[in-house]
Amino acid sequence: MNAFLLILTPLSRYWGSLWKAPVLTHQLRAWVIDREGGPLGQAVSQAIIATTTSGSAPALGWQQIDAAQFTTDEDIINAVVDEQTWIAVVGAFSLPIDCISRT
């Protein structure tokens, strides 16, 4: 009996967490912040934002945020901690390619 409860308790919590996921997931705010604004960064940002409008699977509510709103990474961390957004993807997406091409 104890083994049954040991298995049933975490599974019921897991199933309960998925109960309203398709209905509520899009309400979670998610930010994409491109620090450079280069062509690669724009492509990555648009690909991430496109998941919001694509099809049947539940997706986060992605928004592209102007990098000028947050001058430091700590400002972004504080925004996440203050629950202004659920997740933030911050990138200088072209930087690795520039470093490789200069070597």
Image (cartoon, rainbow, N blue to C red):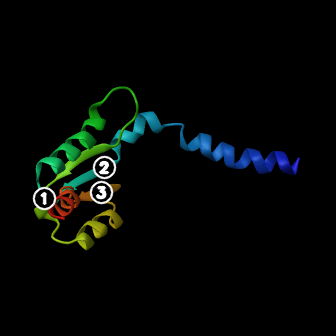
| Disc 3 secondary structure class | strand
| First in residue order: circle 1 vs circle 3 | 1
Q: CA distance from mark 3 to mark 2?
A: 9 Å
CB contact under 8 Å: marks 2 and 1: no
> Where does label 2 land, which residue?
29
Residue in view at x 27 percent, y 32 percent: 53
Tell me residue 81's x, y (percent): 35, 67
Q: Position of residue 47 (x, y in %)?
A: 25, 40
Q: Earlier in the sequence, mark 2 or mark 1?
A: 2
Q: Is residue 90 above or below residue 49?
A: below
* Relative to 39, 13 lies left or right: right
**Residue type, label 3:** Ala
Question: Where residue 38 sits: x, y (%)?
Answer: 11, 52
Circles 1 and 3: CB atoms closer than 8 Å: no
Query: What residue is drawn where x is 32% and y is 63%?
Result: 80
Image position, residue 48 (x, y; %): 27, 43
